[in-house]
Image (cartoon, rainbow, N blue to C red):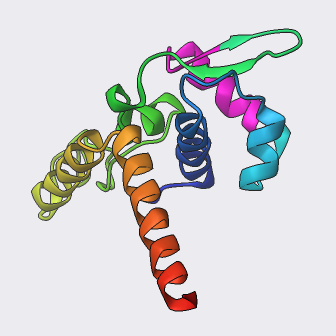
Amino acid sequence: MRLTTKGRYAVTAMLDLSLNYGIRPITLADISDRQGISLSYLEQLFANLRRQGLVSSSRGPGGGYRLSRSADEVTVLDVISAVDEKVDVTRCEGKGNCSNDGKCLSHEIWQSLSDQIRMYLGGITLGEVVKNHQKENSEEEVIKFEMMG
C-alpha cells in the first residue's frame, strides 16, 4: 500500500477544517494558503468529500466548508476512503487471484496487514489528531517560555 498525495492532502485538509470546527465555514483558499495545497486540487478532493457526506458547503460571502459531523466522529480511514484511496497491500487487491487465479503463498500475510492498517486508521479520529497536535504545541510553548525566563 502506498498512500498517494490525494490521501495525504485530503487528511491534511480535513484536519485543517477540524481545527476550525464550529467556528465558521472555511474557504478552500484559506486551506490552500495554510497547507500549501493547490486550490484546484482541493476543489477536486472536496467534491469527493462532499459526495461522501464528510463536509458540507455554503456559498456567498462568509461561505466555505464545514465538517458535516464532529471531528470526533470522522476517522482517518473515512477521509482516505472518501477520496477513493485503497488501503490494501495485496498484489491482487484482496481478490485472492494473485497466483494462477488462486491465492499466492504470501496472500494471507498481506491481507492481514491490510486489515490491520484499516483497523488502525479506522480507530483514529480527526478530533484525536487535532487534540494531540494542540497539546504538543502548547507543551512546546511552555518549554520555550521557561527557557526564556
Q: Residue at x 79, y 45 (%)?
A: 32
Frontmost residue, 41 versus 22: 22
Quadrant placement of the C terminus: bottom right
Location of residue 30 (image quadrant): top right
Residue 37 visible at all = no
Indicate whether residue 15 is drawn in magenta: no
- In the figure, is residue 131 to the left or right of 41? left
Front residue (pair 86, 122): 122
> Vertical placement of 62 versus 1: above or below?
above
**Residue 27 appears at what percent x and percent y?**
78, 29
Residue 43 lies in quadrant: top right
In magenta, the rendered stretch is 41-56
Residue positioned 56% across, 54% down in the render: 4
The extreme front residue here reads 149
Q: Is residue 42 visible?
A: yes
- Classify 68 as above or below 71: above
Query: x and y percent of residue 76 in the render?
Result: 39, 41
